Image: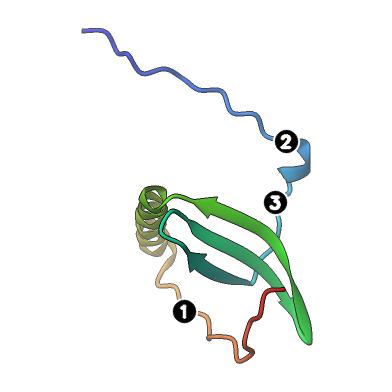
Amino acid sequence: MQDKSKEMRIEFPKELVGGVYSNNMAVTHTREEFIMDFLMMAPPSGAVTARVIVSPGHMKRILNALNENILNYEEKFGKIQAAEEPREKITLQ
């Protein structure tokens, strides 16, 4: 039996190579999509550094991938202590 899987080539735009820093996140959703806004908070203000919009089904896959990677990380490096919740109320404009 032949393996019918195909390799997909992904282009990585130069402007995204360095990534963006985020120290906070806001999540909202509609029936059709989840919207994740990644924020850089530096009181007294902050800015959105990236916005990712995905379907509910893909969000489940993201959640599963994150959970698996956290388990792998903690197995290798030890338990992660959860960061304290921010005291400021976040309002996106």
Q: Residues within 10 Å of mark 3 (few under 14, many from 20)?
A: few
> Furthest residue to the bottom?
87
At mark 2, the secondary structure is loop
Q: Quadrant of residue 23?
A: bottom right
Task: Give the CA distance from mark 3 to mark 1.
Answer: 23 Å
Q: In the image, is 31 to the left or to the right of 89?
A: left
Q: Earlier in the sequence, mark 3 or mark 1?
A: 3
Q: Type of residue at label 3?
A: Gly
Asked if 22 appears above or below 66 in the picture, the reply is below
Label 1's element? loop
Q: Is residue 19 above or below residue 67?
A: above
Front one among 3 and 39? 39
- Mark 3 and mark 2 residues within 8 Å of each other at the beta carbon: no
Q: Which residue is mark 3?
A: 19
* Distance CA(mark 3)–CA(mark 2): 11 Å
Q: Is residue 70 left or right of residue 38?
A: left
